[in-house]
Image: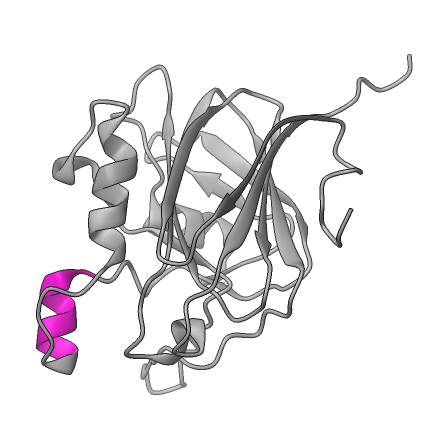
Amino acid sequence: MAAGGGNDLGTVIEDTVVAAGGHWSALVERGNILRIIDLEGCQAVDFLCYNAADPGERYNAADTMKIAGSIFIGEGTKLYSGLGNPIFTVVRDTCGFHDTIGGCCSSESNFVRYGVRDTPNCRDNFLRGLAKFGLDRRDIVANVNFFMYVPVTAEGGMAIVDGRSKPGDHVDLRAEMDALAVLSNCPQVHNPANAYNPTPIRVIVARPAAAPG
């Protein structure tokens, strides 16, 4: 398999290539691994997660940053809900500096920022992914942006700049509860989040082999 291809993860449950600008969502059972692979590099992946048993409990960006002590997500970071429970833990990361503050693009924000209307966007992708679980716009919160780099200056300035990910970079997320995972393979072409050229990603869900005992 190609780098990050899943042969090291255990029993593969799902292995899907998500088209450029596409979306993906699934139930990831507790203890299973969700691997997100940036196949060609510099491709932002917007991500949300929820407690499958009670989707009112969902990823909380502020608490995740406060507990981690960082605005960036990397290996070892736990993605916390607002109830203080980890939903996923980043158990492997070949890139680092994943964004927590930029949020998702929308048709409306693209018009305000770039003067273009009716653009493909991550919020609409999230809505498509959430619909299969009976969730909607009210369930979209501030999200993680894997492989997107948003540095912050000492004066508080921030901007979306060229991504740091290389072809084959990936993150492995271990589900700490039965979790709903929803992602948008960002279709943005008006800033460097995708190097102005959205590309496919690969998503693998796997059940780790039981440790010998």
Image vertical order of residue 70 relative to residue 92, above or below:
below
In which quadrant will I find the C terminus? Answer: top right
Q: Is residue 111 magenta?
A: yes
Q: Quick check: can you spot residue 132?
A: yes
Tell me which colouring the rendered structure shows. Answer: one colour
Q: Residue at x 22, y 60 (%)?
A: 120
Bounds of the magenta segment:
106-113
Q: Residue at x 75, y 52 (%)?
A: 2
Residue 168 sits in quarter = bottom right
Q: 63 or 27: which is nearer to us?
A: 27
Q: Residue at x 31, y 68 (%)?
A: 188
Farthest residue to the right: give it.
Answer: 213
Q: Position of residue 208 (x, y in %)?
A: 73, 25
Residue 176 sits in quarter = top right
Q: Position of residue 71 (x, y in %)?
A: 44, 63
Drawn side of residue 209 relative to residue 57, left or right: right
Report the magenta stretch's main SS. Answer: helix
Image vertical order of residue 33 relative to residue 213, above or below:
below
Q: Position of residue 141 (x, y in %)?
A: 24, 45
Q: Residue at x 16, y 81 (%)?
A: 114
